[in-house]
């Protein structure tokens, strides 16, 4: 097995141009003479870095590769499962346990003999993950011989990271983490380090999921949840309490959901952090949503629109009156699109007011109102009050009831431009949703200008993008015309830059339905969603699927990702 590993990795390295055949043969000869592992010889000779070799080996055999092992908070009980001497002699370290499977950091997860020995020592099934040798050695030094590994690991994370500041409502900042905390307050360091790491990795959410024996922390990166760290259950109450204090919650309330927010500054950028708690079987589950103020400084053209769709949409949002809906599931970027649309048409000659729950980003020169649901306020009540302010443009966070929908329609018919979101999977679904709420079809067609449905798909990582051959079944399912050989498709092989996912970043796919004369007639006569969709496509509308396939053809995303999203 190991000889096959050497052969395949060697062929891959030669083919990629990292080493030539003479260099590889020289390394093989030296390996026979010295007995040192081939990987170490290639690194010692300077032919390849350890990180590059890990990427190739992992990609060849689909071996999980774990970055930032030093950032993991490991339960001391897990550390005690393997004696220090075994870890140092064999370059292994236990990380966490899932059911009866022990996850172990290793330099060679294909070493079956070593895995069998570890099974005997621990009494568990073993899953190995590939790590960098330097990080593994430092991790062993950090955790063994010290009962409280969490304090030391978080100290290293904090010392290495950009300082994290907590900003209060008066725009003043607390002293940085380094000056306000000591090693006597490890939980404060842990929470701040978790937030700082999430910001560094570009996460949009942080999840704290309590389990029977552990507290699992996950980051949502590019729309997908990934494990960030696992810590002992004993730290859970302190971590939860610290987050509640930051969000100004009542820390004594544990059986009732709470919602709040705070602001932090990290890497010279301000972030709004929205916090939601909910009681679960093993304690309170917390979700923190990170809202980057900088991201709103992008433009509509940066979201992934095709040129044709962008030109049509930017023209429509300049209409003097009517309703423009943006639809899609939670996390599809609807609010960002609405914010950027408002910025596109913003002028100090226009009175623009938003009604939101909550306000996710502060927009310069635009009046924003947050609905206070705890005080019994509703979108409808606020919308009625806003209309007395003579606005030119109104954004309503969401229309989900008849009263709000009725006021929005009347506003659109009386020379107001209204932006809002609806819960629907596609553009015809938004029309059906308005009618289901109770709005008459003739009012729907008279008020709605257009409906934009969107999704977010992950972008192929440019550092590991490679060509691949689409299967016959995938090609048939894609709906592409012609021969498969006429197209070039790409995917991400997985590398350290994308944490092995093959993707880095997100872009939008869009479906823009313009309500023209023909569609008005079909809607008013109660025609089916299929007939409405057919007429819209005949008029030139591209569906979400068609827009996504175009991005697959251009090598922006993959067919697999498109299917996952739609």
Image: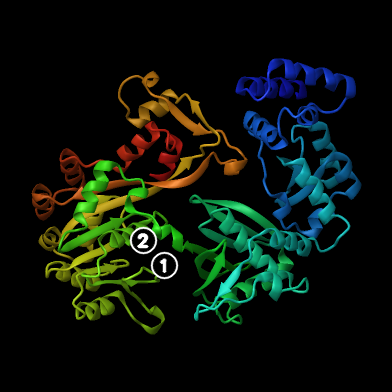
Q: Say above or below: 294 vs 92.
A: below
**Which quadrant of the view contains residue 540?**
top left
Q: Residue furthest bottom?
A: 375
Which of the image's four quarters has the C terminus?
top left
Residue, x 36% and y 68% (percent of image)? 363
In percent of width and height, residue 272 lies at 49, 68
The crowding category of the residue bearing disc 1, from other C-alpha atoms within 10 Å (few below 14, some 14 to 19, many at least 20), is some
Image-based side of 365 in relation to 236, left or right: left
User: As displayed, is residue 415 above or below residue 95?
Assistant: below
**Residue at label 1?**
360
Viewer-closest of 493 and 127: 493
Is residue 125 visible to the viewer in this orientation of the structure? no
- The image shows residue 488 at horizontal and vertical percentages of 42, 25
Location of residue 494 by image quarter: top right
Task: Between residue 122 and residue 499, name the one nearer to us.
Answer: 499
Taking the spot 18% from the left edge, 44% from the top edge, the residue there is 536
Marks 1 and 2 in Cβ contact (< 8 Å): yes
Q: Is residue 41 above or below residue 422?
A: above
Can residue 354 be seen here?
Answer: yes
The residue under label 2 is 335
Helix or strand or loop: what does disc 2 sit on?
Answer: helix
Q: Please name the residue shown 79% across and 51% down the image.
A: 139
Q: Quadrant of the N terminus?
A: top right
Label 2 crowd (10 A; few <14 / some 14-19 / many >=20): many
Upstream in sequence: badge 1 or badge 2: 2
């Amino acid at each position: 097995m190991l000889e096959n590993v050497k052969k395949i990795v060697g062929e891959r390295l030669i083919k990629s141009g990292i080493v030539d055949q003479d260099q590889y043969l020289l390394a093989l000869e030296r390996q026979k003479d010295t007995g040192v592992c081939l990987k170490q010889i290639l690194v010692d000779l300077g032919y390849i870095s350890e990180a590059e070799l890990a990427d190739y080996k992992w990609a060849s055999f689909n071996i999980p590769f774990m970055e930032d092992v030093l950032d993991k908070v490991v339960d001391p009980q897990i550390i005690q499962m393997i004696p220090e001497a075994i870890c140092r002699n064999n370059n292994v370290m236990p990380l966490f346990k899932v059911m009866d499977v022990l996850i172990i950091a290793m330099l060679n997860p294909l070493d079956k003999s070593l895995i069998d020995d570890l099974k005997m020592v621990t009494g568990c099934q073993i899953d190995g993950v590939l790590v960098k040798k330097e990080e593994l050695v430092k991790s062993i030094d950090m955790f063994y011989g010290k009962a409280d590994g969490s304090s030391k690991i978080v100290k290293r994370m904090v010392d290495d990271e950009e300082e994290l500041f907590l900003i209060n409502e008066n725009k003043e900042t607390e002293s940085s983490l380094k000056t306000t905390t000591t090693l006597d307050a490890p939980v404060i360091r842990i929470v701040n380090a978790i937030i700082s790491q999430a910001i560094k990795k570009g996460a949009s959410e942080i999840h704290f999921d309590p389990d029977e024996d552990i507290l699992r922390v996950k980051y949502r990166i590019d729309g997908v949840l990934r494990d960030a760290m696992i810590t002992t259950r004993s730290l859970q109450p302190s971590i939860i309490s610290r987050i509640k204090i930051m969000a100004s919650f009542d820390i004594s309330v544990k059986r009732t959901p709470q919602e709040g927010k705070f602001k932090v500054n990290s890497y010279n950028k301000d972030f709004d952090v929205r916090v939601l708690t909910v009681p679960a079987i093993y304690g309170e589950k917390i979700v923190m949503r990170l809202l980057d103020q900088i991201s709103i400084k992008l433009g509509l053209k940066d979201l992934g629109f095709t040129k044709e769709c962008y030109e049509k949409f930017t023209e429509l949002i300049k209409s003097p009156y009517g309703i423009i809906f943006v639809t899609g599931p939670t996390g599809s970027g609807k609010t960002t699109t609405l914010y950027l649309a408002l910025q596109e048409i913003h002028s100090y000659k226009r009175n623009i007011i938003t009604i939101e729950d909550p306000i996710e980003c502060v927009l310069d020169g635009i009046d924003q109102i947050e609905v206070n649901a705890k005080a019994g306020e509703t979108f409808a009540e606020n919308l009625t009050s806003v209309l007395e302010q003579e606005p030119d443009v109104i954004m309503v966070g969401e229309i989900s009831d008849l009263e709000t929908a009725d006021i929005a329609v009347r506003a659109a018919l009386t020379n107001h431009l209204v932006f809002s979101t609806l819960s629907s999977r596609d553009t015809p679904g938004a029309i059906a949703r308005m009618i289901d709420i109770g709005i008459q079809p003739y009012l729907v067609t008279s008020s709605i200008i257009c409906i934009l449905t969107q999704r977010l798909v992950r972008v192929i990582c440019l550092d590991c993008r490679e060509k691949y051959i689409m299967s016959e079944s995938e090609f048939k399912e894609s709906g592409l015309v012609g021969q498969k050989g006429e197209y070039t498709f790409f995917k991400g092989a997985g590398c350290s830059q994308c944490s092995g996912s093959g993707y880095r970043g997100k872009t939008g796919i869009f479906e823009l339905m313009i309500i023209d004369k023909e569609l008005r007639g079909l809607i008013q006569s109660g025609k089916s969603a299929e007939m409405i969709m057919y007429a819209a496509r005949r008029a030139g509308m591209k569906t979400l699927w068609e827009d996504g396939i175009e991005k697959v053809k251009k090598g922006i995303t993959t067919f697999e990702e498109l299917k996952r999203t739609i």
